[in-house]
Image (spheres, grey):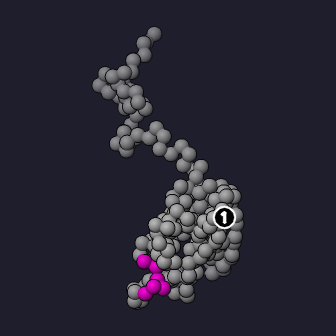
């Protein structure tokens, strides 16, 4: 019997002061749904935070705030997702607004993702916002599946271009020298002396 499983993110919040990520999600396996929530202190991959930052423009637009006055004072920190029976996603974007020496939480009204059969309306997200919300969902799922910031701690260091990596580092050149070991080349490698 084949097992099927799916995850649905319901809420994700990042508390910058506490350095924690809170997630509520449901997981369906073989027709049975379980609800989960958790708060995590491990940092997510950098794309998670930059994706949250990309929600600033939609917040300004939806709440009709003047970008010049508010773009430095509003900080998106979370999204609450809702799903219709047909799978259509709706969302509320939560942000913090700097007021004097404190911050207050503000939320956008709930907006839906436009489907093919719906007309343009202020109650729908534009395509760019939908892409950001979907990206945040995917990054949150990745986080829950273990893709965290420390996973990429050593990525990119000492990486070679693909064409070098695919070559056999132990191939022999016509002179009998081993070539392409890291940055060592046949020109700067000395042949061992034979006893």
Q: Which corner quadrant holds the N terminus?
A: bottom right
Q: Is residue 8 above or below residue 85?
A: above
Which residue of the protein is positioned furthest toward the top in this rendering? 195
**The one of 140 and 77 positioned closer to us in this rendering:** 77
Magenta segment: does it hold 55? no
Name which residue lies at 50% across and 74% down.
65
Where does the image place residue 40, in percent across and percent down from the top left?
Answer: 68, 60
Against 150, residue 39 (above or below) is: below
Taking the spot 65% from the left edge, 70% from the top edge, the residue there is: 104
> Viewed as shown, does residue 191 lie left or right of 12?
left
Rendered image quadrant of residue 161? top left
Please tell me which residue lies in front, 44 or 79: 79
**In-image side of 156 versus 171 (left or right):** right
Q: Residue at x 58, y 81 (%)?
A: 82
Q: Find residue 19 and report its horizontal and vertical position in percent.
A: 66, 57
Q: Nearer the viewer, residue 145 or 56?
A: 56
Left or right, 63 with respect to 187, comes to right
Q: Which residue is mark 1?
A: 102
Residue at far front of view: 100
Rendered image quadrant of residue 31: bottom right
Where, by quadrant of the figure, is residue 168 drawn?
top left
Magenta-drawn stretch, dominant element (helix, strand or loop): loop
Q: What SS does tag 1 mark? A: strand
- Magenta stretch in the rendered image: 121-126
- At which x and y percent is residue 119? 40, 89
Q: Taking the image as drawn, is residue 77 in sight?
A: no
**Residue 127 in sight here:** yes
């Amino acid at each position: 019997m084949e097992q099927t499983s799916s995850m649905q993110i319901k809420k994700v919040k990042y508390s910058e002061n506490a350095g924690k990520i809170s997630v509520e999600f449901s997981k369906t396996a073989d027709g049975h749904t379980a609800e989960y929530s958790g708060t995590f202190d491990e940092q997510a991959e950098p794309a998670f935070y930059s994706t949250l930052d990309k929600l600033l423009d939609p917040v300004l637009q939806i709440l009709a705030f003047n970008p010049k006055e508010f773009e430095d004072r509003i900080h998106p920190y979370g999204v609450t997702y809702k799903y219709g029976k047909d799978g259509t996603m709706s969302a509320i974007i939560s942000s913090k607004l700097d007021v004097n020496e404190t911050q207050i939480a503000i939320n956008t009204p709930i907006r839906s993702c436009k489907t093919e059969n719906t007309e343009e309306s202020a109650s729908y997200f534009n395509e760019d916002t939908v892409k950001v919300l979907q990206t945040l969902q995917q990054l949150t799922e990745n986080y829950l599946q273990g893709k965290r910031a420390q996973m990429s701690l050593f990525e990119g260091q000492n990486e070679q271009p693909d064409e070098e990596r695919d070559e056999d580092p132990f191939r022999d050149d016509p002179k009998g020298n081993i070539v392409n070991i890291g940055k060592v080349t046949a020109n700067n490698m000395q042949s061992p002396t034979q006893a």
